[in-house]
Amino acid sequence: MEKRKNFFLAILAAGYFSCAFGDHVFKIVSCDHYKEEKELRLRICSIRFSPLCASNNVTYSNSCVYCFANIALNGTLRIQHRGTCRKS
């Protein structure tokens, strides 16, 4: 039983640290869902604030807002990092 507990704790820790320190994980955002006709017509995003800095040095409030901007710009945007963009 103790081995099983340690195994699950190790898995949880690995997942936590890969998310906490692995910024590269967040540089890929799938916008496929937002390309559906219904989504494009409605263009409704939540107010959840989880900022992303894109390659155009614009901070998008969350992945939904980023995706609609990226679709409008024909997929030319890329995520630079999580958080707000740094002033140049």
Image (cartoon, rainbow, N blue to C red):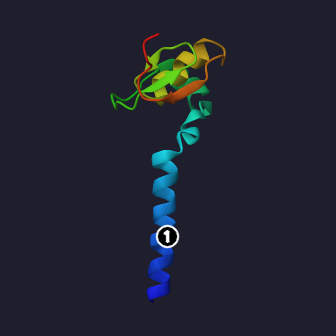
Query: In the image shown, does 37 or 26 lie closer to the viewer?
Result: 26
Residue positioned 62% across, 32% down in the render:
32
Q: Residues within 10 Å of mark 1 (few under 14, many from 20)?
A: few
Observer able to see residue 29? no
Q: Amino acid at mark 1?
A: Ala
Q: Position of residue 81 (x, y in %)?
A: 51, 29
Q: Position of residue 60 (x, y in %)?
A: 44, 21
Residue positioned 53% across, 45% down in the render:
22
Q: Which residue is mark 1?
A: 10
Task: Indicate the quadrant containing the N terminus: top left, top right, bottom left or bottom right.
Answer: bottom left
Q: Report whether 19 appears left or right of 29.
A: left
Q: Secondary structure at mark 1?
A: helix
Q: Report whether 75 appears left or right of 38.
A: right
Q: Position of residue 37 (x, y in %)?
A: 59, 24
Q: Report whether 86 appears left or right of 78.
A: left
State the image quarter where residue 27 is shown.
Answer: top right
Number of numbered tags placed on the structure image: 1
Residue positioned 37% across, 29% down in the render:
46
Query: In the image shown, does 41 or 51 lie closer to the viewer?
Result: 51
Reply above or below: 21 against 88. Answer: below
Residue positioned 55% across, 13% down in the render:
56
Observer able to see residue 71? yes
Q: Position of residue 68 (x, y in %)?
A: 53, 20
Q: Report whether 24 appears left or right of 49.
A: right
